[in-house]
Image (cartoon, coloured by chain):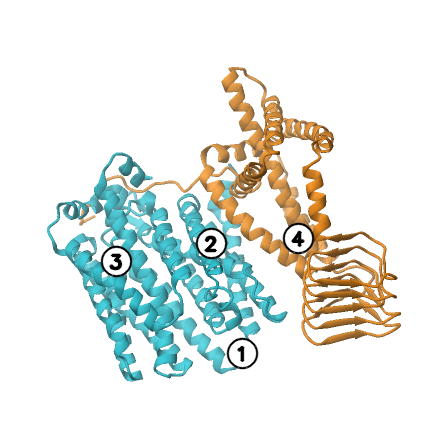
């Protein structure tokens, strides 16, 4: 049981942590800036430094030889002529990017669209990724079952172990989420769908503001955890169904571990069927998010509003 | 679902009654969304050559008069006991539909602003009577467990038709389309309202059954009194806030071609179908969640999404206006969710004895009054030369305020703490 003093310090501690996270997006060596170019032209002259990240939405950015950008460059439109140094990465979604002979990018170059031209003497120290290479990488992963199995087995065992430990030492949250899967499937599905549409939009917006990037990372991590948490609850549900079918009584943690193994085996088998794997993974993720939201990460038992209405017939004088 | 059970058991009368209600309300809401809110604006500005400020004033007058008439009629029905009479409500609804058909046909004859003003007054009378009459039929035709789903069906139908098939937002298109629907509809409605049909007599008795009569929030106290707790005041206030935020924001977006022409008025059928589909999906989600969640949770999502989407519009406007489809998508979700709540909640706060007045209070006071006030505020902003970003910033701030307040209530209220300890 948590002591009253500790109860009071917990919310304060959480707020302090959240505040620190928010501030961490603004720290760095004392100077932080974000330059947004939505029209016109910004020319960075030789020996001039531009602090912070640059977001090019429209207009033009020019960097002369000897100039420096002490941050990342994001191109969503417009034109960037780089002949200086970019200490961070360059990402282009739309627009035009040209790297001159003196251009030096210390980070990665990610091109998912737009027009790109580079002088052969331009230097890119990080990785260069284009939309085509990303697709090729994805297809390579898809077509390499032996490679994925080599990772799948140890990761799968780790997942089964985590499931066992979680259900052993923290069964109540899992049971609450499991109850939602069993008794309130439609509500979990509806809320999960709503969550998956709205929360990623919020996440993207936070990333866009840059100052909320740490909060966005936290939110992104939370979304991943909901899937993981939901899988654990679903594993317990699967294990219980199997136990009932086999008429065997096992401890909850063993039941969950068996269910986890079943779940992983099932996901591996359907993984090779193109649309079905997406559908089943998506369905699980949606149900998990819905159940997590309904139970507030397993902290409360979800129950719909109670129907306490009168049961007698209506009479006009009532 | 009670109606699903009726369907399985082949009890067709309740199912037909529900279908009648859904069709009637969907048609009425579609009329309101297209002809009233968009068509009249076009009539005043393009056809009659009035300036937008004057048109906005006329629309504000429409909203205000409708609210007044609705409250008077609703109260009158409550004190006279006619609120519980299915036959009376059906006949009133028929006359409303008849009047609206005549007004729709007459709109093409309007030549002057004075004639338009007279038309507005007549339309207010019809709409004002229609609200307590038509919404009042919920307790007769939709059982309590299915009100969320019925509201979802109405919302999905109305918005799908409005988003996908509205074409050019011109009064001629709207009135032609509505007349094609209303003329046969009026005849059919007349037969149902006045002909001594056996299944209509059966429907007239449905409101006595407990699953129809008592709204979800109605309680019998120990002393025998029927009460609805303070929720009704809170819900009216919250719905007012939602209507106000939506109307104030959308009025400004409506005057920003880049946002309207890339979404609701896009020449691409695919874009309009996408938005229409989002409306349908969100309505269905809203229907499920209305039945399963505490209503405050749904309000949190609605205000949260409104805050998010107005912030996105504001940021987009500041960065040059890319008009990404994600913004109208989120907007459509928020609108569908609150429309589902609006169609279901007033009956759930009522009994047959008071539904007409409660509906008038809710729909008119929150909906029409909010529209009236937000239109007046929007005119004021326009005359002050307020830029789009600032306008959206204010709307965003309002939505965020409600969102934060509701979050606080949700996590701090005694009922929620009691749930958290289980």
Q: Which residue is mark 1?
A: B386
| Image position, residue A243 (x, y; %) | 53, 19
Seen in the picture, residue B294 relative to B122 is either above or below; the reply is above
| Image position, residue A193 (x, y; %) | 51, 46
Chain B painted colour: cyan
**Residue drawn at x 25%, y 58% as measured from the top left:** B134
Element type at mark 1: loop
Could you tell me if residue A9 is visible in this image? no
> Does residue B212 appear left or right of residue A103 in this picture?
left
Specify few, some or many for label 4: CA neighbours under 10 Å numbering under 14, 14-19, or 20 or more. many
The one nearer the camera, A70 or B62, is: A70
Tell whether label 4 touches label 2 (CB within 8 Å): no
For the residues labelled 1 and 4, the Cα–Cα distance comes to 32 Å
Q: Which residue is mark 3?
A: B134
Task: Return the disc, 2 or 3, that comes first in the chain's sequence.
Answer: 3
Which chain is disc 4 placed on? A
For the residues labelled 2 and 4, the Cα–Cα distance comes to 25 Å
Element type at mark 4: helix
The one nearer the camera, B416 or A146, is: A146
Q: Which mark is residue B278?
A: 2
Which chain is disc 3 placed on? B
Which chain is disc 1 placed on? B
| Image position, residue B413 (x, y; %) | 49, 49
Element type at mark 3: helix
Which chain is represented by orange in the image?
Answer: A
For the residues labelled 1 and 3, the Cα–Cα distance comes to 39 Å
């Amino acid at each position: 049981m948590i002591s009253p003093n500790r109860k009071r310090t917990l919310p304060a501690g959480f707020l302090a942590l959240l505040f620190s996270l928010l501030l961490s997006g603004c720290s760095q060596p004392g100077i932080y800036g974000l330059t947004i170019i939505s029209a016109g032209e910004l020319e960075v002259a030789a020996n001039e430094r531009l602090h912070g990240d640059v977001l090019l939405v429209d207009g033009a950015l020019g960097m002369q030889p000897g100039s420096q950008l002490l941050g990342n460059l994001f191109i969503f439109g417009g034109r960037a002529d780089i002949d200086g140094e970019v200490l961070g990465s360059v990402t282009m979604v739309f627009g035009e990017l040209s790297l001159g002979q003196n251009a030096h990018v210390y980070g990665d170059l990610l091109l998912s669209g737009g027009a790109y031209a580079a002088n052969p003497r331009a230097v890119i120290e990080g990785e260069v990724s284009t939309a085509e290479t990303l697709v090729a990488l994805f297809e390579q992963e898809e077509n390499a079952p032996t490679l994925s199995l080599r990772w799948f087995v140890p990761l799968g065992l780790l997942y089964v172990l985590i499931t066992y430990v979680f259900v052993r030492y923290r069964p109540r949250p899992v049971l609450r989420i499991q109850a939602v899967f069993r008794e309130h499937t439609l509500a979990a599905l509806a809320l999960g769908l709503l969550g998956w549409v709205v929360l990623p939009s919020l996440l993207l917006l936070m990333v866009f503001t840059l100052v909320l990037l740490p909060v966005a990372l936290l939110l992104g991590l939370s979304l991943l955890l909901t899937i993981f948490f939901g899988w654990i609850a679903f594993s317990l549900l699967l294990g219980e169904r199997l136990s009932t079918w086999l008429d065997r009584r096992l401890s909850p943690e063993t039941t969950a571990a068996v269910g986890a193994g079943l779940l992983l085996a099932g996901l591996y088998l359907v993984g090779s069927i193109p649309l079905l794997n997406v559908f089943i993974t998506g369905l699980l993720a949606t149900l998990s998010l819905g159940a997590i939201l309904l139970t507030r990460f397993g902290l409360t038992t979800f129950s719909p509003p109670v129907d306490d209405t009168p049961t007698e017939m209506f009479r006009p004088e009532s | 679902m009670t109606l699903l059970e009726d369907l399985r058991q082949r009890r067709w009368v309740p199912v037909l009654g529900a279908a009648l209600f859904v069709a009637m309300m969907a048609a009425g809401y579609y009329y309101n969304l297209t002809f009233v809110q968009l068509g009249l604006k076009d009539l005043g500005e393009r056809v009659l050559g009035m300036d937008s400020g004057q048109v906005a004033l006329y629309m504000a007058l429409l909203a205000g008069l409708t609210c007044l008439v609705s409250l008077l009629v609703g109260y009158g029905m409550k004190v006279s006991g006619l609120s519980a009479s299915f036959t009376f409500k059906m006949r009133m609804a028929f006359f409303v539909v008849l009047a609206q058909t005549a007004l729709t046909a007459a709109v093409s004859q309007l030549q002057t602003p004075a004639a338009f003003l007279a038309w507005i007054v007549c339309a207010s009378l019809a709409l004002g009577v229609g609200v307590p009459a038509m919404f009042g039929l919920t307790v007769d035709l939709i059982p309590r467990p299915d009100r969320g789903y019925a509201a979802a069906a109405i919302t999905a139908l109305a918005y799908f038709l409005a988003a996908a098939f509205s074409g050019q937002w011109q009064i001629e298109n709207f009135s032609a389309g509505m007349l094609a629907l209303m003329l046969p509809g009026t005849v059919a409605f007349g037969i149902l309202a006045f002909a001594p049909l056996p299944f209509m007599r059966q429907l007239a008795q449905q409101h006595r059954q407990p699953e129809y009569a008592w709204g979800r929030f109605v309680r019998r106290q120990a002393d025998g009194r029927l009460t609805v707790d303070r929720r009704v005041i809170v819900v009216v206030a919250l719905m007012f806030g939602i209507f106000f935020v939506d109307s104030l924001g959308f009025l400004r977006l409506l005057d920003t071609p880049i946002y309207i022409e890339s979404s609701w008025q896009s020449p691409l059928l695919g874009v309009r179908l996408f938005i229409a589909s989002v409306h349908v999906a969100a309505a269905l989600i809203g229907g499920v969640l209305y039945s399963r969640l505490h209503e405050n949770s749904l309000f949190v999502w609605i205000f949260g999404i409104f805050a998010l989407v107005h912030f996105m519009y504001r940021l987009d406007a500041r960065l040059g206006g890319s008009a990404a489809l994600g913004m109208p998508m989120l907007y459509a979700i928020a609108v569908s969710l609150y429309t589902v709540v609006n169609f279901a909640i007033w009956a759930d706060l009522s009994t047959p004895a008071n539904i007409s007045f409660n509906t008038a209070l809710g729909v008119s006071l929150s909906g029409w009054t909010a529209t009236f006030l937000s239109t007046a505020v929007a005119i004021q902003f326009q005359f002050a030369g307020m830029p789009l970003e600032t306008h959206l910033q204010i709307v965003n701030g309002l939505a965020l305020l409600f969102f934060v307040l509701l979050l606080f209530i949700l996590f701090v209220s005694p009922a929620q703490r009691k749930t958290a300890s289980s």
